[in-house]
Image (cartoon, rainbow, N blue to C red):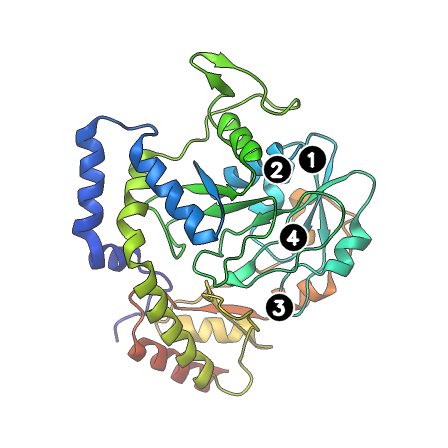
């Protein structure tokens, strides 16, 4: 039987390949490989998708987080509150700035718990990073410090998951709006903050061969969105609405057919379920059975950030995140997932779940 992949990037490209390839070819023929109109077009699309005034294209979702945190003034020695359930980059971006990620627990949806975030706040707290996990909108705690959203899984959510002073977006290939390599955006409404982000990601440039520190603690560096990746994103953007419609139909099919013992993780209304995640007390056995049946599945995420060795010992307890990390399982849901694929996954879950 033909395997069902967890992701199918080649299949995605085959759907709209000529249009995307023409955009890339146009850039190659233009000789304008850094910045230029194609990057500006991608930035305008990113701002629209996240419901914000403007966007700055950057080299990855991780760089988007780092630049946004730098722009709001996070410096070495500061603390930044992050949720316990997320990809490591949420905490890694903080570490890379010489700051300390302080892990707060999550709610039953895997989203930052505002009450625990308030308990984690200290006089050194300089920012908080809610993660809009799996496309669901995270609560935004009012801690008296800047909020920088990690919206790296949030493209396609309605209304848009972007509530902080700045939001970081990833266009890693597996994202709903994915490039053919790394890329990302910082989006927001504050022109001054976005100007800082742009300067920080372009060697601190404030004029031709004139460089400054856009934020006192930081000199600039090279973290620009590649024009070829921007071309891929612009080529894929017109098809996002149709992709979302198909995706939501598959999500409804999953939701309606899950067997006893396998439960969809609660989602906020309008979430694109990116990825589609279920909870089961037999997660590891179910994962192995799906793999044995030729069905791709993955764990998001196998351990709390507080349990990552890079953060060191003595982290705050995160019991809800620990419980979720033992039970969450992501099922196949991508551009080429069919009703037949969903039905086959559901049958396998019925046998194994």
Q: Determine which residue is flagged by label 3.
A: 109
- Sequence-first tag of 3 and 2: 2
Residue 260, x across and y down, in percent: 53, 88
Q: Is residue 236 visible?
A: yes
Quadrant position of residue 28: top left
- What is the distance, in whole Å, between disc 2 and disc 4 at their CAs? 19 Å
Residue 276, x across and y down, in percent: 46, 68
Tell which of 173 and 153 is nearer to you.
153
Q: Determine which residue is flagged by label 2.
A: 69
The label on residue 305 is 4
- What is the distance, in whole Å, between disc 1 and disc 2 at their CAs? 10 Å
Q: Determine which residue is flagged by label 1.
A: 99
Left or right: residue 60 versus residue 18 is: right
Give the mark toward the camera: 3 or 2. 2
Q: Is residue 300 visible?
A: no
Q: Secondary structure at mark 2?
A: helix
Q: Are marks 1 and 2 in contact (CB under 8 Å)?
A: yes
- Sequence-first tag of 1 and 3: 1
**What residue do we see at 25% from left, 60% from top?**
11
- What is the distance, in whole Å, between disc 3 and disc 4 at their CAs? 16 Å
- Sequence-first tag of 3 and 4: 3
Give the mark toward the camera: 4 or 1. 1
């Amino acid at each position: 039987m033909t395997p069902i992949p967890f992701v199918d990037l080649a299949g995605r490209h085959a759907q709209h390949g000529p249009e995307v390839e023409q955009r890339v070819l146009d850039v190659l023929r233009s000789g304008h490989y850094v910045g230029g109109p194609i990057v500006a077009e991608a930035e305008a699309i990113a701002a629209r998708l996240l419901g914000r005034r403007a966007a700055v294209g950057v080299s990855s979702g991780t760089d988007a987080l780092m630049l946004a945190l730098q722009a709001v003034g996070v410096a070495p020695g500061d603390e930044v509150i992050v949720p316990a359930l997320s990809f490591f980059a949420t905490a890694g971006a903080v570490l890379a700035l010489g700051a300390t990620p302080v892990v707060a627990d999550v709610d039953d949806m895997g989203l930052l718990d505002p009450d625990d975030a308030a308990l984690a706040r200290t006089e050194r707290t300089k920012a908080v990073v809610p993660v809009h996990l799996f496309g669901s909108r995270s609560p935004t705690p009012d801690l008296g410090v800047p909020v920088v959203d990690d919206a790296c899984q949030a493209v396609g959510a309605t209304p848009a998951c972007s509530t902080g002073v700045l939001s970081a977006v990833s266009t890693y290939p597996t994202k709903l709006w994915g490039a053919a390599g790394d890329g990302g955006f910082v989006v927001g409404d504050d022109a001054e903050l976005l100007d800082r982000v742009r300067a920080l990601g372009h060697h601190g440039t404030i004029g031709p061969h004139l460089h400054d520190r856009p934020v006192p603690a930081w000199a600039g560096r090279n973290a620009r969105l590649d024009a070829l990746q921007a071309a891929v994103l612009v080529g894929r953007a017109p098809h996002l609405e149709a992709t979302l419609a198909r995706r939501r139909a598959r999500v409804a099919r999953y939701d309606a057919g899950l067997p006893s013992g396998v439960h969809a993780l609660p989602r906020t209304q309008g979430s694109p379920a990116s990825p589609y995640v279920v909870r089961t007390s037999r997660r590891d056995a179910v994962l192995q059975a799906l793999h044995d049946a030729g069905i791709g599945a993955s764990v998001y995420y196998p351990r709390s950030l507080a349990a990552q060795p890079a953060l060191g010992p003595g982290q705050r307890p995160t019991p809800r995140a620990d419980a979720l990390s033992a039970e969450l399982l992501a099922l196949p849901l991508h551009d080429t997932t069919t009703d037949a694929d969903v039905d086959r996954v559901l049958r396998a879950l019925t046998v194994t779940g």
